[in-house]
Image: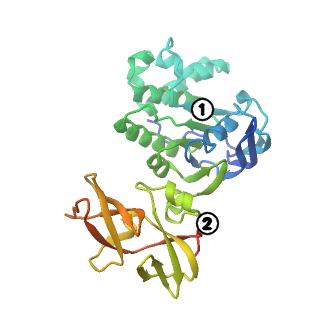
Amino acid sequence: MLAGPVTTKPDGNALALADVRKQFGETTVLKGIDLAAEDGELVVLVGPSGCGKSTLLRCLAGLETPDHGTIRIGERDVTRLPPKERDVAMVFQSYALYPHLTVRRNLAFGLELRKTPARTIDKRVTEVAGMLGLEALLDRYPRELSGGQRQRVAMGRAIARRPSLFLFDEPLSNLDAALRTEVRIEIKRLHHQLRTTMVYVTHDQEEAMTLADRLVVLNGGVVEQQGPAIDVYREPATRFVGSFLGSPAMSFLPAEAKEGTLTVGDATFDSESAHRGPCTVGLRTHDVVVDPDGPLTLEVRVVETLGHATHAHGVVEGHPFVARLHGDQRPAPGDEVRLRPVYVHLFDPESGARIRR
């Protein structure tokens, strides 16, 4: 293990995208992306399939060229530079290792292409192998490694180059659940140690929430919201963000706000919002508690037991709803459970934008 962080570039590697657009034929994939990340931040791009996150990553790597806008790494405008001139390293979900080369040669390959002196290559390979626990595997071939070990080699090859920017394209997709957790922790530890700017693409919410310094939620080629992961989760800027982040997803109920209350169907309960008029109430599973005198009635359809939590799926006032149960609460399908909201998110019923309190 290295005693301290590895320094990559002394001039800072902040990332700035301004009005980045990309179109393929008649389809516009990126519709004006603005994104700013500080030097050393771990930025996670998350969103549904087709939202543009992989295209955006390819634009950062130089594998695609934006039709409009600028991409800057530190003080450099890299918008139209070829990949080899950008000083970025990319880790793919498919590992992309050279099967005929040993782990040692895979780690050294990028440095050899750059005509790095042999002594420097040996030093870098030794450092990276120590960081990732690959010392005993240096003379093995990729076919002799597990999935987790292969992904470590892929990350090591990128680290050995000491780039200005690391790009990760769903690197854990091919790993089983236990290995995903293990390698995810490894990536977080490495980021803390390397202090290098990283951009990480995933569709997995748990990865996104646990890894991100800055979380960027994409939808339909635009940034719906970006900021610290916990802030995006707690204060979703739109109904889409509220529905996309969290598992189970946030439940939504049409409501009418007036005089410090919210009315949902035949149920009325207190509200701290000053909003008046129609709105959409968003409730996460932990935003409601079971209360025999609660104003909302959940008609239970399915009970899902996860060990650490139990979720009751059903309908409230005719709308799909999920509530988290505690203790020995185990209703059966067909039962009714009374619920009391303890925190509500309000959204505009037409635009989907968050209604501020």
The foreground one among 316 and 244 is 316
Quadrant of the snapshot with the C terminus: bottom right
The foreground one among 254 and 245 is 254
Instruction: Specify the quadrant of the image occupied by residue 329.
Output: bottom left
Label 2: element kind: loop
Read off the residue under disc 1. 90
The x and y percentages for residue 39 are 64, 49
The x and y percentages for residue 256 are 52, 78
Placement of 275 over or under 337, stated as above or below: below
How far apart marks 1 and 2 lie (CA) works out to 35 Å
Q: How is the image coloured?
A: rainbow
Placement of 155 over or under 291, stated as above or below: above
The x and y percentages for residue 2 are 47, 37
Q: Identify the residue at the far left of this view.
A: 328
Label 1: element kind: strand
Instruction: Specify the quadrant of the image occupied by residue 295.
Output: bottom left
Q: Residue 177 has which mark?
A: none
Tell me: 267 left or right of 193: left
Tell me: 33 left or right of 106: right
Q: How crowded is mark 1: few (under 14 residues within 10 Å), some or many (20 or more)?
A: many
The x and y percentages for residue 211 are 49, 48
